[in-house]
Amino acid sequence: MKRFFSFLLSASLLASLFSCQKSPVAETEDTTPPDGPTGVISVVIKTPAAETKSATLSDNAIKTVQLFVFTPDGKLETSKYLENYTSSTELKITAKTGDKMLYVVLNGKRLNFTKTSSFENPQDTELNDLSENTKEKLIMVGKNQVKVEPYTSAGSSESKVTVNVKRLTSKIVLQKVTVDFKGTTLENGNFSIQDIYLVNVVGKAPYGVKDGGIPYTLAETSYFSNMANWYSKATYANTAPEMTYDLNYNKICDNVNGGQVDIGLSYLAYPNNSTQVQNGTHNTDITAPVMTGLVLKAHIKSSTFSDTAVDKDTYYTFDLPQLEPNKQYVITNITITMPGADNPGERVASGKITPTITVDPWADGNTNITYDF
């Protein structure tokens, strides 16, 4: 049976300030364990493998931890919130003896449950926003079963459990762009990259975790078709959160015609399982879920070997595969051989762009996907 858990967000936001001297770990018991025999759960968190393709990315860092203990019937028993986490921090929580489900939320806002909170109903699952993820902290979730044994300082040992956590986000990496206008009227022209961004970005995700340990996605709730939960619909929106780890793309690449340029940008998006392509000429807000796309904006200028001088912006847009949580989609190279479209709402025609994408679980192993347009 699918299992979700629900949250009511605290009015106060998490605000951790870091300096050269580390602050002590702050622990807060959010609820009081029920009366009766209790035990101590000792928690070990196993994060996903660190990413090696982006040296500046702290994509498995832990800043804050929340632990939630649920009873077998899905009701919250107790919880604990810790900030200023370090690798030496001991994660322990007291709970009533017996079988329990332990949930872990890393790097998210501090979350409070009602006394009747359950993780059974996806309609009641609290959503978090893509903007809550940053370069220094990505939201991760996980769960595991544990049997809590009676514990005293001079008696039985603690009940130990390891929780494997997964990132809620998908990551899109663009490594290189190759421009080759050889044999065309633009062979000796100028091609400069102006901007690179995502469109049709799912902006929210639930905190729920499947029995297999993979986070639930917005598409598995009733909220997927609500366009209020999306960013940059059809075109780039200035109100969207910073979706690149490099914050803003300010590296204008001038005259890359006839060569290859290193881009090295990474983007965040929440999972999107839509297979519907955006209308090729559609340049206004989408009204139903479509595939997330990557847009490369360039400027071309040339009058050599051409009857008509070219001096305009051009767009190269292609749809990404279905995005899954805790996976990265590495675009190893985009080859451009022709002018693109006149606006970012259009998908370019055959021969204008050929991206090669590698999909991997943000850890080990990969799959190559070549897109032929």
Image: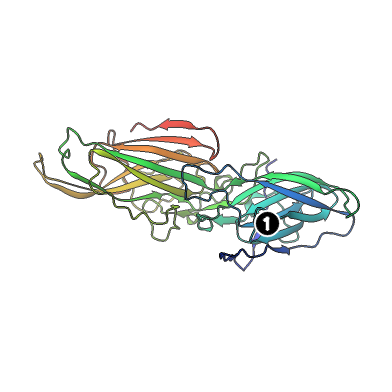
Q: Is residue 128 above or below residue 337?
A: below
SS for dot 1: strand
The residue drawn where x is 50% and y is 57% is 131
Residue type indicated by callout 1 = Gln
In the image, 231 versus 267, the foreground residue is 267
In this rendering, the answer to whether 321 lies above or below 151 is above
Q: Position of residue 274 (x, y in %)?
A: 48, 41
The foreground one among 261 and 200 is 261
Residue at 34 percent across and 43 percent down: it is 262
Q: Residue furthest front?
A: 21
- Viewer-side residue, 170 vs 290: 170
Q: Tell me residue 276's x, y (percent).
A: 43, 40
Q: Is residue 316 above or below residue 93?
A: above
Quadrant that contains the C terminus: top left
Mark 1 highlights which residue?
66
Estimate the x, y position of residue 39 in percent, counting from the top left. Answer: 85, 52
145 lies left or right of 322? right
Say how many tags the image has.
1
Instruction: Say if residue 286 shows up in the picture.
Output: yes
Q: Position of residue 287 (x, y in %)?
A: 43, 51
Instruction: Tell me, yes or no, if residue 112 can be seen here.
Output: no
Left or right side of 181 for 51? right
Q: What scheme was used to colour the molecule? A: rainbow
In the drawing, does residue 241 fall left or right of residue 3?
left
Quadrant location of the N terminus in the rendered image: top right
Q: Residue at x 45, y 52 (%)?
A: 245
Q: Residues within 10 Å of mark 1 (few under 14, many from 20)?
A: many
309 on left or right of 260: left
